[in-house]
Amino acid sequence: MATEPQGAPAAQPLALLAAPQITSPKTTQTIMRDVLIALVPTMVASVALFGLRALAILAVSTASSVGFEYLWCRLRKLPNTATDLSAAVTGVLLACNLPSTIPLYMVVIGSFVAIIITKELFGGIGRNVANPAIVGRIFLAVAFPVAMTTFVPPHIIKSPIDIVSSATPLADAAAPLPHTELLVGMHMGVLGETSELAILVGLVYLLARRIITWHIPVTYVGTVCLLSLVTGNDVLSQAFSGGLLLGAVFMATDYTTSPATIRGKVVFALGCGIITCLIRFYGNLNEGVAYSILFMNMLVPHINALTPNTPVGGEKRKAKRGEAHE
């Protein structure tokens, strides 16, 4: 039997991958870490606006999401993926989609739906067909509509209203809020939707770190702004109200549930913008971001199939019949 000489270096495994082989120092953990860093301004703003209650929701949502993923891996005897920070990102995003008044046990239920049902039952990270945080939010909105639509004004402003229960805090067309208040977050809403300025800071960080590209956020928000202008709605109020920026920056850009090509990303974002406006302007709900992203998540495999990149060295167009053998 042939043996390797003593002291010889161990043989490296042969990588049988399709060309071109491009390596990158980025890993799932480093990408998710950057997303968490980008979410820090939004988290700080939510605590500043809604107090320690916001901090409690953020902590419970993140801890329960990570805990559910860890327990799933232990029960299934799978490698522990809780350390890749993807569950932590889901927990923070879910918390950002919740009002500060929601009971904490509902937060845990939302985390279970997001991690176990939406993510792990489909095979874990990279295999889920919808954004887990969005599914968790929609489930809670359907199961606990009163709790999900009960809002309080931020602590830093004085308001004669202590608590409001409504379909959404999206600005009333009859009495829109000043644009500066919408930008800073001086109004009622869920934790991560109020301070649009904090979300924009996170967007700049993600673009600078090349974690996302501009195509989905700009196309999504631009579509909503254009349709708002055409239909006679206040453009800035529609852009800075509700969960548009939060969804466009942090949830519509999810790697797993968004298209892989540039053309696909534009088509995906256009669809999100159109559906959001249809729901806002003509539906029974004033807010449609979560539902629009969920609907377009279902179409991502088809968008990828219809908008492929041209392979390196490949033909840019298919030959017509009769031309191939002239």
Image (cartoon, helix red, strand yellow):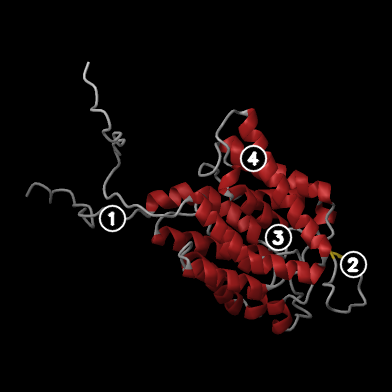
Which residue lies most toward the top here? 1
Query: On the image, which quarter does residue 201 sit in?
Result: bottom right
- Label 4 and label 3: CA atoms lie apart by 19 Å
Q: Does the CB distance between marks 1 and 2 fall below 8 Å?
A: no
Residue type for callout 1: Thr
The residue under the point 79% across, 62% down is 54
Instruction: Give the numbered dot on residue 310.
Output: 1
Query: In the rendered view, would you say 152 is above or below 314?
Result: below
Query: On the image, which quarter does residue 6 sit in?
Result: top left
Label 1 or label 2, whichever comes before in sequence order: 2
User: Quick one: SS at disc 3?
Assistant: helix
Q: Nearer the viewer, residue 52 or 121?
A: 52
Label 1 or label 3, whichever comes before in sequence order: 3
Instruction: Give the numbered dot on residue 256.
Output: none
Q: Does the CB distance between marks 2 and 4 fall below 8 Å?
A: no
Count neighbours of disc 3 (C-alpha within 10 A) and say few if under 14, some if 14 to 19, many if 20 or more. Answer: many
210 relative position to 21: left or right: right
User: Which residue does the numbered mark 3 point to in the structure image?
Assistant: 96
- Label 4 and label 1: CA atoms lie apart by 38 Å
Of discs 4 and 1, which sits in the foreground? Answer: 4
The residue under the point 74% across, 67% down is 46
User: Which residue does the numbered mark 4 point to in the structure image?
Assistant: 69
Residue type for callout 4: Glu
